[in-house]
Image (cartoon, rainbow, N blue to C red):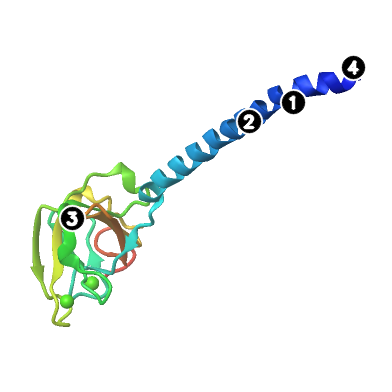
Amino acid sequence: MRRLTKLKVIQPIEKPMIKNNIALLAIPILATIMVLATIPPVFAPNIEVDIDIKPGSDPNSINPNSMGLVPVAILTTDTFDASTVDPSTLSFTAVVDIGSNNTNCVRHGLEDVDGDGDLDLVCKFPQKTTWINCDTTQGVITGQTNDGQSIIGFDSINPVGKGCNSTG
Ligand SMILES: [Ca+2]
Ligand SMILES: [Ca+2]
């Protein structure tokens, strides 16, 4: 009898404890959902865009000692409209560590560089700050669209001139 009495006393205490445990479980679950909800913008993959370094030229022969501007076109395709790119966000470099440079587009305009009837975005970058040297094999352009979507594009570079193996 004593034991039964004890159980009767304990039961009403245990029930709210279970409810509390469920509430405690709900907090990390809700927190996880909230954290996951913030992840997509951070981990959203870059849109890989088609680019053409020195539009109209192939290979893209560049003399690393030149002090001129390198034109790079972002091509409009069936799935990407180059006119949605914000030119002020564009950066172009020959180095893999794309965070380490600040080679910005100094001149830009829309023109149909590949002759397919749609407008492509052409940006010109000061070559002396692109890190192009005789070992460079490709250039990388990064930037954002007007609505904040990150873009990235790659094209080959054929270094030519003094000290480089290729004569272009
Ligand atoms: Ca080209
Ligand atoms: Ca075009």
For the N terminus, the image quarter is top right
The answer to whether residue 77 is left or right of residue 17 is left
Of the image marks 4 and 2, the number of the one nearer the N terminus: 4
Q: Of circles 2 and 3, which is in front?
A: 2
Amino acid type of the residue tagged 3 in the rendering: Asn
Residue that numbered label 4 is attached to: 2
The answer to whether residue 46 is left or right of residue 90 is right
Pointers 1 and 3 in contact (CB under 8 A)?
no
Is label 2 in a helix, a strand or a loop?
helix
User: How busy is the neighbourhood of tag 3: few (under 14 within 10 Å), some, or many (20 plus)?
Assistant: some
Residue that numbered label 2 is attached to: 21
Ligand 2 lies in which image quarter? bottom left
Question: Residue 96, position in %: x, y?
Answer: 37, 52
User: How busy is the neighbourhood of tag 4: few (under 14 within 10 Å), some, or many (20 plus)?
Assistant: few
Question: Residue 99, position in %: x, y?
Answer: 32, 44
Q: Of circles 3 and 4, which is in front?
A: 4
Amino acid type of the residue tagged 2 in the rendering: Asn
Is label 3 in a helix, a strand or a loop?
loop
Pointers 4 and 1 in contact (CB under 8 A)?
no
Question: Residue 24, position in %: x, y?
Answer: 58, 30
Separation of disc 1 and disc 3 at Cα? Answer: 61 Å
Is label 1 in a helix, a strand or a loop?
helix
Residue that numbered label 3 is attached to: 146
**Please, is residue 51 above or below residue 20 in the view?**
below
Of the image marks 2 and 1, the number of the one nearer the N terminus: 1
User: How busy is the neighbourhood of tag 2: few (under 14 within 10 Å), some, or many (20 plus)?
Assistant: few
**Please, is residue 75 above or below residue 141 in the view?**
below
Separation of disc 4 and disc 2 at Cα? Answer: 29 Å
**Please, is residue 74 above or below residue 125 in the view?**
below
Residue 164 in view: no
